[in-house]
Image (spheres, rainbow, N blue to C red):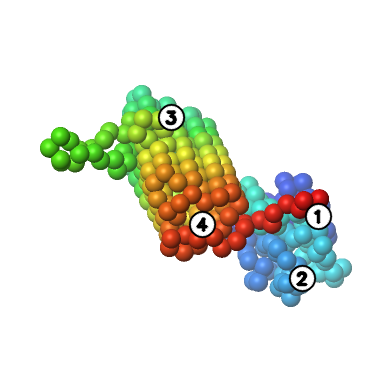
Amino acid sequence: MTRTDLTASLVAQALTAPLLGDDRPVTGLAPVSTAGDGDLTFVMDPVKYAAALEAALSAGAIVLAPASATVAEESRGVLIAVDSPRAAFAIAVDRFFARKPEPGVAATARVDPTARVHPTASVGEYTVIRAGAVIGEGAEIRDHVVIGYDAVVGDHCLVKSHAVVGEEGFGMERDAGGDYLRLPHVGSVVLADHVEVGNFVTVCAGTIAPTRIGDHTKIDDHAHIAHNCQIGRNVIITAAATLSGSVTVEDDTWIGPNASVIQGVTLGRDSILGIGAVAVRSVPVNEVRTGNPARRLSDNRPAPSAS
């Protein structure tokens, strides 16, 4: 992962951030603990990691750091002062180093003639996009994905390999003879813009109305989102989490690995459900819950002062 045409000043310009030191080439990426000549790296806490920062700058690295960080005159490296170094690093890597998929539909993919795929979208190998589905601008659908009937994948979404978005959920009802029959789920799924769906994730179709995932929500690998769930904006759902049917997750909520949420409950805005937690009751706004059954641990953020 190397570059021959990138400089520290170009990175700083892309981030609208000041460059502290003389311009120099950026040739690669590295963690701050091993960054050498030409490596782009970042440091969140220049005091805690002072030794690593000094070594990286001495070696000639280009370091994204808070404005409080300083660079010695004799250092070969340079600083780019940013408010959030990790976020700035993510932006820079995406802009200058990350591989971008070519727009278009892979030869082995199957796209129903009634589906609509934006010309700037990318559809990977052996993916199936069923009738009525809509794939938005700049969306990336990777390999072996199934996009169900009438599902909507918003602009700049990423659906990773082997995910299934919009097939039926698990809805059963007994008939007059007491035998189970399948309740058809025809509501499909709507992914808003900038949603990420991880590898082997299932997002099940709503029974009548769509299952919805809000803007900028990120779903880690192996998670399960059941039918009729309503997920807000900027939600994090980490690996192997399971949401049962008709769960509501409000904005800015974090769901930990292997957490489970029983059907019909609500996770309030800014709440956190800890690793392995089992939510059998709704979680209030701004509350942290852990354990099985999940119990209050603390507030997520300090309560505002009365003054």
Is 279 displayed left or right of 41 in the figure?
Answer: left
Kindly tell me whether residue 42 is visible in this rendering.
Answer: yes
Characterize the local packing of mark 3: few (<14), some (14-19) or many (20 or more) Cα atoms within 10 angstroms: many
Question: Which residue corresponds to mark 1?
Answer: 19
Q: Which of 109 and 192 is in front in this view?
A: 192
Of callouts 3 and 4, which one flags the residue occurring earlier in the amino acid sequence? 3
Q: Which of marks 1 and 4 is in front?
A: 4
Q: Who comes first in sequence, dot 1 or dot 3?
A: 1
| Alpha-carbon span between mark 2 and mark 1 | 20 Å
According to the picture, the residue beneath numbered tag 3 turns out to be 134
Three-letter amino acid code of the residue under disc 3: Val
Whole-percent x and y of residue 16? 77, 46
Indicate the quadrant where residue 123 lies: top left
- Please name the residue that numbered disc 4 is placed on: 273
**Relative height, residue 187 to residue 61 (above, below):** above
Q: Residue furthest bottom?
A: 51
For label 2, the residue is 47
Q: Mark 2 is on which residue type?
A: Val
